[in-house]
Image (cartoon, helix red, strand yellow):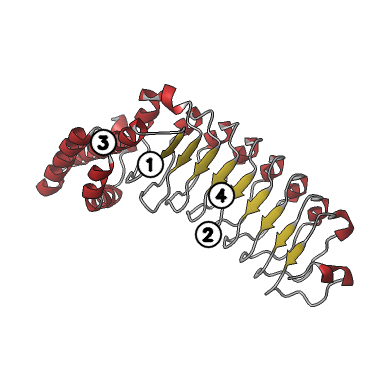
Amino acid sequence: MEHQHQLHSKESMLKEFKFLIKHKKILLRSINSNRITINSQFKVMFNLIDKGLQNIEDLIELDICLGKINTYIAMAFLNSMEDHTLELKYITRLPALLFKMHLNKLKILKVLRITGFYNQLVNLPSEISYLCNLVELDLNHCALLDLPKEIGQLKHLEKLNLNDNFFTALPEEIGDLKALKELHICNNPNLSSLPEEIGDLFALEILNMHHDGLEILPRSIGKLNSLKVINLDFNKLIIVPPEFSQLSHLERIHLRHNRLKKLSLVLTNLKNLQTIDIGENDIDELPEEFGTYLH
């Protein structure tokens, strides 16, 4: 049975259940539509849990129920959407059904915020690609392990916030975000490298990746001709690729608290540079020309 194959683990479903129960009252106060439908699904969920989830059929029903609750919650917030901006709260999943039912409305969406302070989202569906006019996507502090490759189809995206998640890698399709100006991927300690395709983000102005686990940077980073600010504080970098010297629009470089022993940059190429922060590294000596910029 296909649904059984896709079934979440019992542990993850019980975690979802606890999260939704904890926020049930405030959730129902927050929405103006689908309240009755959501309440009825909560009753079904309570009955399943009280019964003790005795067999696989109970788990399948709980899985379906959780999916429905998330769909109805998202629909309720979508119905109250204003100014092409949607902020989702108290969801544990982003069901594909939501995209299929409300495609016309989602196509005009420009800003989507799903911050983890009010959610427990662990993955994005491939249908995220339907949000073809999205300009800003904020997934701060969720519990995401990865991104679907379809993220690269958001051709108008200018700002992407992936702070405080659990990424170990980024899909190479992230390089397809040709309009992207800001990329924030901080506090992902298991993220040790970037795909070479990161260098294809020709419009990128801000790359913010402090407190990750970066050990190496791709040489393609030298292709980011629009980059003005790069923050790589608190990583595990041993070297900075010489291609950094090609980033002629750079204004600020933050490399504090890495494992750098040497910094070889041709500053004459960095005509807009104002600041280099390389504190708390293992660098013994720097050329005199660095003195003007160091902090």
**Which residue is painted at 77% across and 57% down in the image?**
241
The residue that disc 2 covers is 187
Tag nearer the camera, 1 or 3: 3
Position of 281 relative to 147 (above/below): below
Q: Nearer the viewer, mark 1 or mark 2?
A: 1
Of labels 3 and 2, earlier in sequence is 3
Measure how far apart labels 2 and 4 are at the Cα level: 13 Å
* Amino acid type assigned to the residue bearing label 2 in the image: Asn
Q: Quadrant of residue 101?
A: top left
Tag 1: Cα neighbours inside 10 Å, few (<14), some, or many (≥20)? many
Residue drawn 17% across the image and 39% down it: 39
Left-right relation of 260 to 94: right
Secondary structure beneath label 1 = loop
Q: Callout 3, which amino acid?
A: Asn
Look at discs 2 and 4 and give the one toward the viewer: 2
Q: Which residue is mark 3?
A: 32
